[in-house]
Amino acid sequence: MRILLIFIAVCTHAADWPTYRGDDARSGVSLEQLNLPLEQSWIHQPLHAPRPAWRGPAKADLYNKQFNLKNRQLFDHAFHVIADGQSVYFGSSADDQVHCLDFNSGKKRWSYFTEGPVRFAPTLYEGRLFVGSDDGYAYCLSTEGKLIWKKMLSPREYRIVGNNRMISAWPLRTGILVRDGVAYAGAGMFPKEGMHIVAFDPKNGTDRWRTIQNSWPFQGYLLLSENRVYVPTGRSNPIVYNRNNGKFFRDLSKTNDAFTLIKWNGKPLPNPRQNSRVLGVFGEGNGDSFATFTGNHMIVADGKSYLQANGELSVLDRMRYIKLERDYKAQAAKREQLGKTLAQLRKQKSPEVPKVQQQLIASGQALGEIQKGIDNCVLWKTPCNQSYAMILAGNMLFAGGNSEIVAYSANDGNRVWSAPVNGRALGIAVAHGRLLVSTDKGTIHCFESK
């Protein structure tokens, strides 16, 4: 699974958590600092647990002879929440509703029915909620649960049986994002029926532009950079469109990463089909650059990469690593060329052989020194068995595990706090001094300072 992360300047919108993973970059970063220890202030248990569209991974990748694959489509295995100062909001894949809880008590304030599963968290923008449903519609609701408008993003009203539910042939399975007065969403799951990526007016749902393609399905939280829309395609790599006109820009499976984490901890990397491949996108302006990490989660902030692999959490000095990685590639290319030159000179029995030999030895020593520097870019690493979710809030990393949520100091990796939760902690959010944790059993826990 390639999880897309865009690294841009992060702000917390008055400490709200307005969309999945906090912002339209899906950074998982908040500037808010929680004062530990925390204690549970309330717990909400819906009547029904999530009903995921895809309950497990593919049985095998027979073409590549890979087995024991990891599930690549976990977007609706928990009720991911957003929050403002008064309320917590989430969509349900089980009862087809958008729910609102009181932020202080966890008690239900209101709910709103759509005509299909709501598999993605709402997005809060300028006091309105934007929600996509498997019924093929985008909804705009007030924070009091009143319908402002609904818009069919699918080309026509046509229902089918999908994932054991009655849904549109063009379900909204990307969530909705709003930026600079434009909303974005994808509609469709079957390429032969046409996949629609749509930019529309958040005030009334009117199309700004619409692009249709027939090659990839749309499934997963889309995200935005300054000039691009990144659209996950389920088990395949994301595809990219220009934000201003909807023109196709890039298929990331056909792109060479500008910055790739390769054996950064000195260990061979596992197969990405079995351990997820996390793809980071960062940078502003016309160009976005990429970083990949074979593991579970990657957060990029303050010049560092926080990397969560199976059983281990570590921090990489990203800026220094980038420079050394470039130096390593340049020196490796120089050494390769020296090797070719030396081979040619030996055939010619040239008197320049000893000189080039010394240059080759010096180049090898330089590579060794650069590699030592790369190894030292790992600022710290610590055992971590919480592999399901991770965010950074202030100077604290919160990691979701099996029946627990754990806090690690971002400064040194020390485990500083933990609490039990009901199930696998798949969703984490921070807003207005509180920590919200969502599990695969549908449970939502709220923690705050004692």
Image: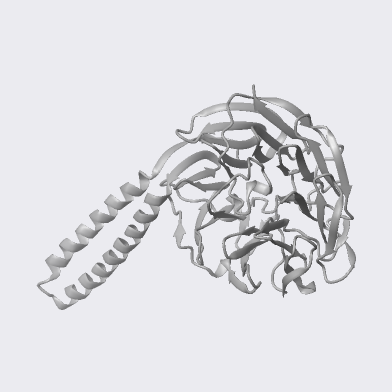
Protein image colouring: one colour
Q: Is residue 266 left or right of residue 8?
A: left
Image x and y of residue 411, in percent: 45, 34
Q: Is residue 357 visible?
A: yes
Residue 409 vs residue 307, the one in the foreground: 409
**Going 36% across and 55% down the picture, which residue do you hit?**
323
Picture quarter containing residue 38? top right
Q: Is residue 136 visible?
A: no
Residue 45 vs residue 61, the one in the foreground: 45
Q: Quadrant of the C terminus?
A: top right
Q: Is residue 423 left or right of residue 109?
A: left
Residue 246 vs residue 352, the one in the foreground: 246
Q: From this viewpoint, which residue is outermost toward the top? A: 450
Q: How many numbered dots are placed on residues in this image?
A: 0
Picture quarter containing residue 102? top right
Image x and y of residue 55, in percent: 76, 49
Image x and y of residue 362, in percent: 20, 58
Q: From this viewpoint, which residue is outermost toward the left? A: 351
Image x and y of residue 332, in percent: 31, 62
Q: Is residue 424 above or below residue 71?
A: above
Q: Quadrant of the N terminus?
A: bottom right
Residue 143 vs residue 346, the one in the foreground: 143
Picture quarter containing residue 334? bottom left
**Going 57% across and 32% down the picture, which residue do you hit?**
407
**Going 45% across and 59% down the picture, which residue do you hit?**
259
